[in-house]
Amino acid sequence: MTPILSIVDLKLLCHIGVPTEERAQPQKILCTAVFPVPNLKKAAQTDDLAHTVNYYDLSQLLQKTARQKERKLIETLATDLAQAAFAAFPLPWMDLELKKFILPETRHISFQARFVCPKSKTRSRKAGFSLSPKSRARDRVSRLPHR
């Protein structure tokens, strides 16, 4: 099993939504990021942050990226977050879940996708940045009652 780290329900503030009115005020999006530990053995042996991912720095980057510009689609936000993470950290892949609290009578909208770094050896460089074929993007509405 590949060792992973998870940042669970990181609060992002961003202007997002299709209608202009929805983008007028910042919205809270909860972001969960799951990614592999680059070198578990070396990190454990040396107790050195250089052999793993600094999850504080990654969380700050995700929050900054979310604030940078307006977006209409949650899919665009997820792609921007993954691209920023790949540019700053040696990650071959990242699973993201974004929760948006916009529809009445639902807990949230959840977007989930696995992103694969275009620099990864398992992907063609010609293909560019894309979703992993093994894990398709999907929107789903959780129809559970609010707590």
Image (tube, rainbow, N blue to C red):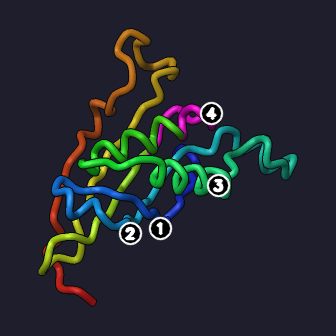
Contact between marks 4 and 3 (CB within 8 A): the answer is no
Mark earlier in primary sequence (1, 2): 1
Vertical side of 15 occupied by 83: above or below: above
Residue at image location 45% in from the left, 63% down from the top? 12
Q: Nearer the viewer, mark 4 or mark 2?
A: 2
Q: Amino acid under label 3?
A: Tyr
Query: Mark 4 sits on what residue?
Result: 90
Element under disc 4: loop
Q: CA distance from mark 1 to mark 3?
A: 14 Å
Which numbered disc flags the more N-terminal residue, 1 or 3? 1
Identified by mark 4, the residue type is: Pro
Residue 136 appears at what percent x and percent y? Answer: 24, 39
Residue 87 falls left or right of residue 126: right
Disc assigned to residue 48: none
Disc 2 and disc 3: Cα gap in Å? Answer: 20 Å
Q: Which residue is mark 2?
A: 28
Q: Which residue extends farthest bottom?
A: 147
Q: Amino acid at mark 2?
A: Lys
Question: Does 112 appear in magenta?
Answer: no
Where does residue 113 sit, x and y in percent of width and height? 32, 45
User: Quick one: SS at disc 1?
Assistant: strand
User: Could you say where residue 88 lies in the image, as x and y percent from the top left?
Assistant: 62, 36
Q: Camera-side residue: 16 or 74? A: 16
**Residue at (28%, 51%) from the top-left corner?**
74
Say whether disc 4 or disc 3 marks the residue closer to the N-terminus.
3
Residue identified by numbered label 1: 11
Mark 3 burial class by Cα count in 10 Å: few <14, some 14-19, many 20+: some
Q: Residue at x 28, y 90 (%)?
A: 147
* Element carrying mark 3: helix
Q: Nearer the viewer, mark 4 or mark 1?
A: 1
